[in-house]
Image: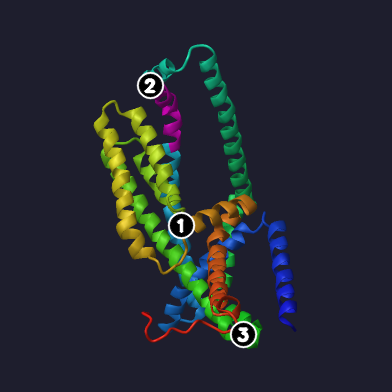
Amino acid sequence: MTVRQQVISWGVVFALFILILTGLREILFPFVAGFAIAYFLDPACDRLERAGLSRIWSTTLVTATFFVIFVLILSLLVPLLYSQLIQFLENLPRYVSAIEAKAAPLIELVRGYVAAGEGVDQVKQFFEAHLGDVAKFAVGFLGKFASGLEVTFSLLSLFIITPIVAFYLLRDWDHIVAKIDGWLPRAHVDVIREQIKLVDETMAGFVRGQFSVCMLLGLFYGIGLSVVGLDFGLVVGLVTGLVSFVPYFGMLIGFVLGMGLALAQFDSIVPILMVAGVFGVGQLIEGNFLTPKLVGDRVNLHAVWIIFALLAGGALFGFVGIMLAVPVAAIIGVLVRFTVGKYLASKMYLGPEGPPSESPDEEP
């Protein structure tokens, strides 16, 4: 088979994969979640196997422990988040009134710089038109997110199907890997294995490191905002840490929520500045300590590339796309670096005579 035929064959396989993924995206979420859980729990099973346990007992112990901890965390967080949400909705009219009262002098100041009559009407029409666009975008985004969650059939099916998928994948993980390895073309098996290893290191390094960063940031923001006295500070902190999986976006969302609540709740400037200080210190800790130590530069995934991948995955496939965004980004990144390396070593880049030779008198 020629190189052209191989490229066409792999292109057809990739196109069919995308077509199947698109057609089945409404039922994929529990299976993707189970695969992700199995992928990240496999090292723990391997350690237990090396300690003397069989694969079936290792899988049972690791899977049961993971889901017991997961359910315990949910049982602690869900009632807290629910009560905080109810309390927030009850206090929402008071917050809106407080913000309107505090914003009234600023509105009057702005109105003084705008000509009466036509100018005010134009500004009002501008904001009404764009607020409508923003509302439509928000409704559309929430609709896509909700449709992504519906792929689980129901919350019950998620808690039933995902553990089963994770258990069986984890039990047969080594056999699956060996089977796929046996399908690789023998002429290129070493190169493909090397690229797969790089993908694995990139994906695992980023996801595990970023997960640790999100957890630590959530605890820091939650405790810090609660100590400052911000209403719903724990929830705002946990949400900020969770959304910090998207670089810079999480901190921005948390800062907007926190400062909005602070402006509505506090009448003096000092606690408002303290809330801003918590986010500032958190950003310093993340940028100078957490991310360099736990994630580092070894993952070779630029923040802009991650943001684009998450947004593109969510727009194309909903919540399943968000889950697949980082693995796909890692695969594309490794393949691009491999292709660029081959290009830089090829005659297309170096020319038919190869790299120019340096004379002894030239400085290196």
Sequence-first disc among 1 and 3: 3
Q: Tell me the CA gap for discs 1 and 3.
A: 32 Å
Find disc 3 in the rendering and name its residue. Answer: 188
Find disc 1 in the rendering and name its residue. Answer: 303
Q: Is residue 9 above or below residue 153?
A: below
Q: Tell me the CA gap for discs 1 and 2.
A: 36 Å
Q: Position of residue 275 (x, y in %)?
A: 30, 39
| Residue at x 63%, y 82% (from the top left corner) | 179
- How dense is the environment of label 2, judged by Cα within 10 Å: few (below 14), some, or many (20 and up)? few
Sequence-first disc among 1 and 2: 2
Find disc 2 in the rendering and name its residue. Answer: 106
Q: In this orientation, does residue 163 appear?
A: no
The prevailing secondary structure element of the residues shown in magenta is helix
Closer to us: 140 or 74: 140
Sequence-first disc among 2 and 3: 2
Q: Amino acid at mark 3?
A: His
Quadrant position of residue 142: top right
Q: Tell me the CA gap for discs 2 and 3.
A: 67 Å
